[in-house]
Amino acid sequence: MEEAKKTEAGEARRVEAEEANHIEAREAQRIEAGETSRSSRKVITFEPKLVINKGILGLGFVLRLFAVFGTIGSALAMGTTHESVVSLTQLILLKANYSDLPTLMFFVVANAIAGGYLVLSLPVSIFHIFGTKAKTSRIILLVIDTVMLALVSSGASAATATVYLAHEGNTTANWQPICQQFDKFCERISGSLIGSFAALILLLLVVINSAVSLSRH
């Protein structure tokens, strides 16, 4: 009888141990499943701030790209501007060239420098979209963007005075308008000036965009 009782007690302990092992196994599976679901949730976590920052940097790249066309296009249009006409009253050949006017030459140089810089800055701007933590290079880019903004602004302002005199002249200084004779020349320099002012606005937006993205860093 005693041996039978011992056998039953041992069997009961064995059953209890197996049940405990089953419970522990189920608990371990439940914990593992919970960790897996949490890790999967981490992978698909949506970060609005990061998306917005990348969107701002992407917009800055687009503005910078359009500013390239504005500056380089204005420099090329002005730099290839010349016209020759025959004066019927004096029977001489009159020529008008952008290089005859220092303000227009400065306009070409300023826009060419700004356009060249903007082309070189495009790869850096792309890098900033994917490497949003690059703060130092973004600050340097913002400083140079501001310098280019001032350069294009000064070139466009200087050319504006010359273009105005070409169209309207100045009776006080006895300067006659030349656009009545050199109409194509005046159309060309006026178009270049409009393109430069468009690039100026885009550069201003680029600077504002860079400042906003840095403030959100």
Image (tube, rainbow, N blue to C red):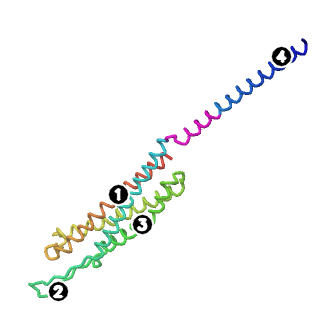
> Residue flagged by tag 4: what amino acid is it?
Glu
Marks 3/1 in contact by CB < 8 Å: the verdict is no
Q: How far apart are marks 1 and 2 (CA)?
A: 40 Å
Q: What residue type is labelled 1?
A: Leu
Q: Which residue is drawn at 37% across and 70% down?
A: 112
Q: Where is residue 7 in the image (x, y as percent from the top left)?
A: 86, 18
Find residue 150 and report its horizontal and vertical position in percent: 38, 61
Task: Assign a secondary structure to mark 2.
Answer: strand
Query: Which residue lies under the disc numbered 2?
Result: 93
Identify the mark at residue 119; answer none if there is no mark.
3
**Amino acid type, callout 3:** Val
User: Where 59 sits versus 107, above or below?
Assistant: above
> Where is mark 4, residue-wise?
8
Q: Residue 202 carries which label?
A: 1
Q: Earlier in the sequence, mark 3 or mark 1?
A: 3
Q: Are marks 4 and 3 in contact (CB under 8 Å)?
A: no
Badge 1 vs badge 2, beta-carbon distance below 8 Å: no
* Nearer the camera: disc 3 or disc 1: 3
Query: Which badge, 4 or 1, comes first in the chain's sequence?
Result: 4
Q: How crowded is mark 2: few (under 14 residues within 10 Å), some or many (20 or more)?
A: few
The span picked out in magenta is 32-46
Q: At 42% from the left edge and 50% from the top edge, which residue is drawn?
A: 56
- Mark nearest the camera among 4 and 3 is 4
